[in-house]
Amino acid sequence: MSSVADASVAPRASAWGRFRRWLANPWGRPRFLPLLTWGYVAWSIVPVLIAVQFSFNATRSRTNWEGFSTRWYWGDPVDSVWHDPTLRNALVQSLKLAVADVVIATPIGVLLAIGLARWHGRGSGTSNFLMLFPLVTPEIVMGVSLLLVFTEVFTFIGTGTTAQILGHVTFSISYVVVIVRGRLFSIGRQFEEAAADLGASPTAALTRVLLPLLMPAIVASAAVVFAISIDDFVISQWLSSGGETDTVPVKIYSATRAAPLPSTNAIASIMMVLTLASITLGFLVWRAFTRGERRAGQSVVKDMGALEI
Amino acid sequence: MYRRWLWPGFALPGVVWLIVLFVVPFYTVVAVALGTVDPILFQPVPIWNPLEWNVGWLNEVIHRLGPGGNLTDVALRTLQYVAISLVLSLLIGYPVAYYIARLAGRTKALLLILVIAPLWINYLMRMLAWVNLLAPDGYVNRFLTYTHILSEPRDWLGGRPSTVILALVYGYIPFLILPLFAALDRIDKSHLEAARDLGASRFSTFVHVTLPLSKVGILGGAVLIALPMFGDYYTPNIVSGAPQTSMIGNQIDLYFHGGPQPTIGAAITIVLAAFLTLLMGYYLWTIHRATREARTA
Amino acid sequence: MARGEIRLIGLTKRFAEVTAVDHIDLDIAPGEFFSLLGPSGCGKTTTLRMIAGFEQPSEGRIILDGTDVAYTPPHKRNVNTVFQNYALFPHLDVFDNVAFGLRRAKRPKNEVKERALQALALVQLGGLESRKPSQLSGGQQQRVALARALVLNPSVLLLDEPLGALDAKLRKTLQIELKTLQREVGITFIYVTHDQEEALTMSDRLAVMNGGQVEQIGAPQDVYEDPETLFVADFLGVSNLMDATAQGAHDGRCRVRADTFELAAGSGAIDVTGPAKIVIRPERIELESREAASGPNRLPGMVERLVYVGAAVQVIVRVATGDALQVLVPNTGKSLPYQQGTPVQVHLPVEALRVLVADEAGEAGPAKDAALAEASGRD
């Protein structure tokens, strides 16, 4: 593009031109990419951090910072999370559903994962397809269908805690299957064959070899189920019978639309800590259990990301 | 080595559960949508026998969704919002995923954690965060008036499509970045090196090698967020209380909770589900074609 | 009672339309080091897995010390396996790995400890009991796998390409160790490999398999020197195949015509007539100067290439029939009297020249120029 004539003209020294060249960085890596990425990360996380910060606000305002206080967590005798019965109740309800979900969905999911991975007969393809469906179904469709089934078909259950638990388990099972199945594929059949070769009965091969090797995935999937159950909004809302059966996300939703107090921020922050703690725990357990299997340099994140769909 | 019935036996509890609590509910929606309404109690009467299905309400809904109906605006608006949000998400998400997957070096693990974290932060909390920021006296308005970009605080939460789209993008983009990252991370470096070796510039390598190889990931990620976005009702409700930004999910919500006409709600749900199934089918067909090409290559 | 005698009778395994193992009959003597040798897909691993019990035969019987175990589950057979990638339990340390089978058999604690430590000493891994498999080298892992299998005193030990993942030098060392170990322990070893050199080195007898069938069984020397089929001739070592027309037996030798040359082949299918192949091993061919006295079984040729492989020199000679033959000349330290382009006379000694009939399907193993078959034999 440059011609002999241009060579005698000095390059533009404008600030914008220089900035653009610095950004494009033609001899190295384009600089706008890391800028964009870190900018995105900031845009993604900072609003949440601000919201957490305001949960510690000394006044009722969610927009004006007026000093640090824990009143919204336990200080305020009326509106804090600890003292407001609706908020406390919602917390308890959320935990109830999450624990029940883990206890029920994990075993069912683990069995389903093993069964689907090994079963090759008739019906296995359809069952696999069936298992994948909840993962791609929009929540509102699931909410509608579950509401209708509990009001038109299984009317002895109706809406409420039982319905919520059943609903949570239904969408959680698939997550367990996908996580456990990834681990199953990376293990393969070789260890059970070795166990049988050495004299272990089929039961012993399953309990003494397969199950211990599957443990990181089982724990990780339990952590994931806990997290998605706590965070669930749509199903919990649709199957709620009001008041006592509202979970924290439902309360956050109604408060946000009405007149949110910093206590809303507070309870949302508590949920966030619980969820992140659960996921981190699952991740750490996975890492600890599989330490003996990884060669130097292999990334745990990559391991976990090997979700077999 | 193992008994043949062991594996189906293991799978049985899960399969039974999913049939009873997933398939049957689905069928219930169909039965209600294609059912009748009790004229006295205004209760839906589900019809279970396919031969007796009543398409009256379904037709009514389709009519309303079609040109001239009172649901047309909502349907078109939903398509619009999802499409724009999708494009914006890709424009932001693809470069971010690309950077983390291929160029981040030492910061890769940290960035990955920071990008995955929002997935595990309650969706509603993330929306709450923006409600606080976009309040009349929130930080956004304060910043904009302070820098004189605006002369007075704007009402962001009163029914603006741009706010809804911003919220949708903010909410769903982490779910797009992850599959994009996975697809880009998977690309073998030797393909790119081969392209450079054969004379392609960096940009050209990106356009002719990286982009095509990540096509499957793009499509997958797009479907992954489009599907739930179509059914979203809470995002518009939180960041904009107004009916002029309502999406199809809001309509379903209204017909069930607003003055219940469950039969219509069910009918709309079926239409939505059918539409999404078509979308899903298109995606699976494209994947199938892509894998077939890859295999013969 | 014989310990470790295996007989396979009509053993067959079909997977959908593919017959992986086709009516195999084998008799393996107790205490023998027996190898199953063949290219990938020939059915050797499937055969081994059927003996171990991980696959059920479609037809046939597996007689172990007089009992048909074809339908016995693997954990009830007195047969143990060393897997290709060892399959050491990652969640157990070395001691627990080796003790695994003993514990399943509910042996008393002190017996378990004694036998496990003994087994580890046998494979020279004493002192590593509390290590985890991931902390061991490939060679060490292989020994643990061996100890784990041997500690149970099986009648037969099955080894599925156990040295495949190791580097060449380590492989050679372990080959010798395994052979010594087998002699010491006296158990029947059935060894699967695709490496013909390995099989020739270690086995008492071996079976060459191809396409689900056994092509030839015999001691290494017999199989190498007297291949009965083209496949075996081609698979083991370099074969120097040439097309020829056989004209039947005369004076105990087969008269063959290769191109325009009349040769006499002293071994193989001597009585045949019609299209055939003649083979000779590279180390049996003699190169003579063009001026030397002529005689029977001599062809004019020209040296095309010399390849130095350390202990010997491969001389690729293009003979007048058009074939390229590989001659192996041991390295005596003296320089060779020919180089690239030198015309020579190629002597194919009668006793070393073998005549074979092509397989029915006409696929006698990939017919190829000997020049393309590089040094240490095909896999």
Image (spheres, helix red, strand yellow):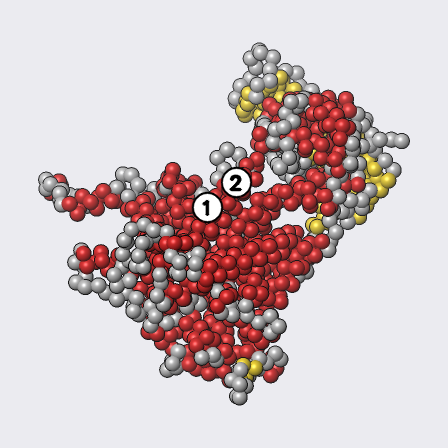
Residue at far top of view: C334
Q: Position of residue B260 (x, y in %)?
A: 47, 79
Left or right side of B35 for C11: right
How far is the residue under mark 2 from the one under mark 1? Answer: 22 Å
Which residue type does callout 1 highlight? Arg
Circle number at residue B186? 1
Q: Nearer the viewer, mark 2 or mark 1?
A: 2
For residue C35, what is the image quadrant? top right
**Rendered view: A3 above or below C355:** below
Is C319 placed left or right of C18 in the picture? left
| Image x and y of residue B290, in percent | 48, 56
Q: Could you classify mark 2 by the number of other residues whose Cα lies within 10 Å: few (under 14), some (14-19), or many (20 or more)?
A: some
Q: Residue furthest bottom?
A: B40
Q: Residue at x 71, y 35 (%)?
A: C100
Give the chain letter at badge 1.
Answer: B
Amino acid carrying mark 2 in the image: Arg
Q: Position of residue A184 (x, y in %)?
A: 60, 47
Screen quadrant of the C terminus of chain C: top right
Q: Secondary structure at mark 1?
A: helix
* C184, above or below A210, in the image: above
- Foreground residue, C254 or C370? C370
Q: Is residue B62 visible?
A: no
Residue A294 marker: none
What residue is at 38 percent from the left and 54 percent from the top? A75
Q: Quadrant of residue A126?
A: bottom right
The answer to whether residue B283 is left or right of residue C116 is left
User: Dot 2 corresponds to which residue?
Assistant: A287
